[in-house]
Amino acid sequence: MDKISHGEILKKIWKHLQMGAEKRNHPFHTPVLATVSENNLPSARIVVLRRFIKDERALIFHSHIGAPKIKEIQNNPIVSFVFYHPQEKIQLRVTATSSIHTNDSIAEEQWQRTQLLSRRCYLGLPPSQICENPAPGFPEEFVNRKPSIEETVIGRKNFAAILSIINSIDCLELNVHGHRRSLFLWSENNSLQTKWLTP
Ligand SMILES: Cc1cc2nc3c(=O)[nH]c(=O)nc-3n(C[C@H](O)[C@H](O)[C@H](O)COP(=O)(O)O)c2cc1C
């Protein structure tokens, strides 16, 4: 197997997280986010990685403030993200500590970055409610047209940016000539410990 350092692997991880946040067709754009539900059960779903801030080891995604995952994160801010890149054959299992932002500069900056079409999701009821019939997830009038900027203003109060600071990354790289698994652990004072793991 090629000799490689943890530093080189981390550089590759940061590059893919950055691309995942910026490019819609990059597989890291849609990680699985796992939280602990109110009944203490695992709860996992896809979210869109909207932003990666390397210097803060921060991942940001957006959600409706009424989504069950918001309460779950408020109850237990330790979350896990799973990323997989099928061409590069890289799996990342990330643990992070999340905070919910609705009324501060983080929320405002992220709201300003949203597209009008995406804002439709904040104009109606939160996800995961039981409904009589199949529902589009936003008011019917926007099924076939983009809302105007004025029409999206009402959605701002339902918008949350969730910022997650990475605590650890377990990186598995699959390779026909031998897999490689590395572990990165950051302590509270941001010092980094690295280890190799059996794949
Ligand atoms: C490709 C894809 C991207 C999604 N992105 C988000 C997202 O960024 N934020 C979000 O709250 N839900 C997103 N969802 C919907 C969630 O997976 C989930 O169904 C919904 O938010 C309800 O989750 P909850 O009940 O656990 O809160 C996405 C679903 C898919 C399939």
Image (cartoon, rainbow, N blue to C red):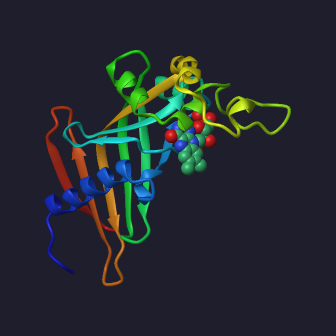
Q: Where's ligand 1: which quadrant?
A: top right
Position of the C terminus by quadrant: bottom left
In this view, 73 is above or below 197:
above
Q: Position of residue 190 (x, y in %)?
A: 17, 37
Q: Would residue 54 be visible to someone looking at this image?
A: yes
Q: Which residue shows up at 31% across the image and 84% down it? A: 177
In this view, 54 is above or below 39:
below
Q: Would residue 45 be visible to someone looking at this image?
A: no
Q: Nearer the viewer, residue 165 or 22?
A: 22
In this view, 100 is above or below 80:
above
For the view shown, which residue lies furthest in the bottom direction? 177
Q: Position of residue 35 (x, y in %)?
A: 50, 38
Q: Position of residue 152 (x, y in %)?
A: 56, 24
Position of the N terminus by quadrant: bottom left
The quarter of the picture where residue 88 lies is: bottom left
Q: Which of 140 and 60 is in front in this view?
A: 140
Q: Which of 119 and 192 is in front in this view?
A: 119
141 displayed left or right of 15: right
Q: Which residue shows up at 80% across the image and 31% down it? A: 131
Q: Which residue shows up at 73% across the image and 30% down it? A: 141
Figure label count: 0
Q: Which residue shows up at 14% across the image and 65% down it? A: 5
192 displayed left or right of 80: left
The quarter of the picture where residue 167 lies is: top left
Q: Where is residue 182 in the image (x, y as percent from the top left)?
A: 26, 61
